[in-house]
Amino acid sequence: MNRTEFVIAIAVILFAAFVLGWFASWLVYRFSRVTVSDVAELEEMAKSLHDAEEQRDEAITYYQYRENELSTQLTQSQAELTAAMDGLREARQEAGELRKYIEKMNA
């Protein structure tokens, strides 16, 4: 093999490598490109996610409001119960004192 044949063989090999590389690049681009429908689907998914996050935030806000409201009602109910129990205790003491007084007056 002389020098000219060697140069031609190397040129053919390099050209074949270039063509193979270009073809592989074209295949990768062809199979991995993003289509318009894919973009539309991604946008729809992003919109759905955004709506779901807004609903979650609204639900959290509502539940926090409701929890505060129920805590307030519970505190008020406990205060009313305590007042009622104190009143009942005083009424029992007064009834006991009146019973003792009536027994003392009858005796």
Image (cartoon, rainbow, N blue to C red):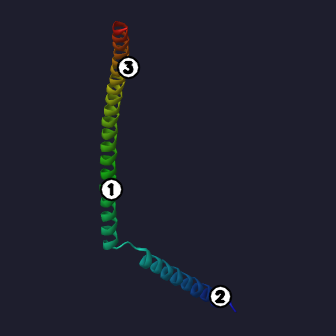
The correct choice, above or below, for 73 with respect to 13 in the image is above
- Secondary structure of residue under mark 2: helix
Residue at mark 1 to residue at mark 3: CA–CA distance = 54 Å
- Quadrant of the rendered image containing residue 80: top left
Image location of residue 34, percent across then percent down: 37, 72
Q: Which residue is mark 1?
A: 52
Pointer 1 with pointer 3, Cβ within 8 A: no
Considering depth in this image, is 72 or 65 the residue closer to the camera? Answer: 72
- Identify the residue shown where x is 48% and y is 83%: 23
The correct choice, above or below, for 85 with respect to 65 in the image is above
Residue at mark 2 to residue at mark 3: CA–CA distance = 116 Å
Give the amino acid at mark 3: Arg
Please report whichever mark, 1 or 3, sits nearer to the chain's N-terminal start.
1
Please identify, in this view, whether the residue under mark 2 or under mark 1 is nearer the observer.
1
- Secondary structure of residue under mark 1: helix
- Quadrant of the rendered image containing residue 6: bottom right
Give the amino acid at mark 1: Ala
Q: Which residue is mark 3?
A: 89
Give the amino acid at mark 2: Phe
Please identify, in this view, whether the residue under mark 1 or under mark 3 is nearer the observer.
3
